[in-house]
Amino acid sequence: MNAESRLPQKSRPGSTAGGGPVPRRRLRPVLAASVLVVSVVVAVVALVPGGESADRPATASASDSPSAAPPADPALLALARRESGDPYALGRRDAPVVLIEYSDFQCPFCGRFARETKPELLREYVEKGVLRIEWRHFPVFGAESEQAARAAWAAGRQNRFWEFHDTAYAHPRERDKGDFAEKALVAMAEEAGVEDLDRFRADLASPAADEAVTRDVEEGYALGVSSTPAFLVNGRPILGAQPTDVFAEAVEAAAVSEEARAQDGTDE
């Protein structure tokens, strides 16, 4: 079984199929250098022979002494928003490592990452100030995915995004069977502690929700993201719900690189 969810041809954000997806504006370039797009696509595909990502043992153990990661493209590093008070991010704004996650609430492999890997990353790296996690909405499965993305954004408007995230991913859900219909989403918001449900409903249906989701989708497409979940760890791509050790190795290697870079800057 693949450890990722492929982008359905007829359910892409921006299509008109799938029962009323979010209205999409004409995609505009997010990154100026086209070479960046090529480099990211090549790097992502190189992670998985044949373009497929399967569950497999990590190539390096987090218990080994981590080596420094190769220098990342500065434009990839610049994708980290590091916005103060960002409700869609976890961890210190100045953490040396940023993991950017492109995910869909109907993606089963995104759910696996949320339930199995994210808690470990929070304990081992986020709480220690090493890692920051930044979410990007990347709905790939049509109308319910897009509705869930807007709902998650709306929950974030009341600083309950991550509680909503954990509620939505608490257990596997059936795709396009009403689990992410508006009534269900309001119930998730209430469970997640969203206090003003009338405001939640208004934010869910607002043009601002469309704009926020579209912003993330365009960023992902500009990078060549075509499946979920997809990640960047200080610019290093990781595709699919890989074992936790893969993420731990990437975080530790990136932290070593940042520490070395900081020391070089001090010595100059």
Image: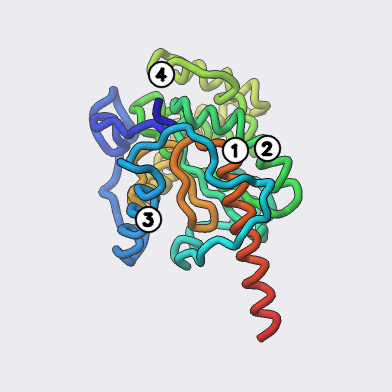
Q: Residue at x 67, y 35 (%)?
A: 119
What's the residue type where badge 3 is placed? Answer: Val
Q: Quadrant of residue 252?
A: bottom right
What's the residue type where badge 1 is placed? Answer: Thr
Q: How crowded is mark 2: few (under 14 residues within 10 Å), some or many (20 or more)?
A: some
Q: Mark 4 points at which residue?
A: 175
Report the Cα–Cα distance between label 2 and label 4.
27 Å
The picture places residue 224, in percent across and down from the top left corner, at 33, 49
Q: Residue at x 58, y 54 (%)?
A: 98
Do tag 2 and tag 4 residues touch (Cβ < 8 Å)? Answer: no
Determine whether, in the image, residue 45 is placed left or right of residue 102.
left
Q: Mark 3 points at which residue?
A: 40
- Image disc number at residue 244: 1
Do tag 2 and tag 3 residues touch (Cβ < 8 Å)? Answer: no
Determine whether, in the image, residue 104 is placed left or right of residue 26.
right
What's the residue type where badge 4 is placed? Answer: Arg
Q: Depth check: give the residue in front, 266 or 78.
A: 266
Do tag 1 and tag 3 residues touch (Cβ < 8 Å)? Answer: no
What's the residue type where badge 2 is placed? Answer: Glu
Circle 2 SS class: helix
Earlier residue among tags 4 and 1: 4
Q: Name the residue under label 2.
A: 120
Seen in the picture, residue 182 relative to 62 is either above or below; the reply is: above
Earlier residue among tags 3 and 4: 3
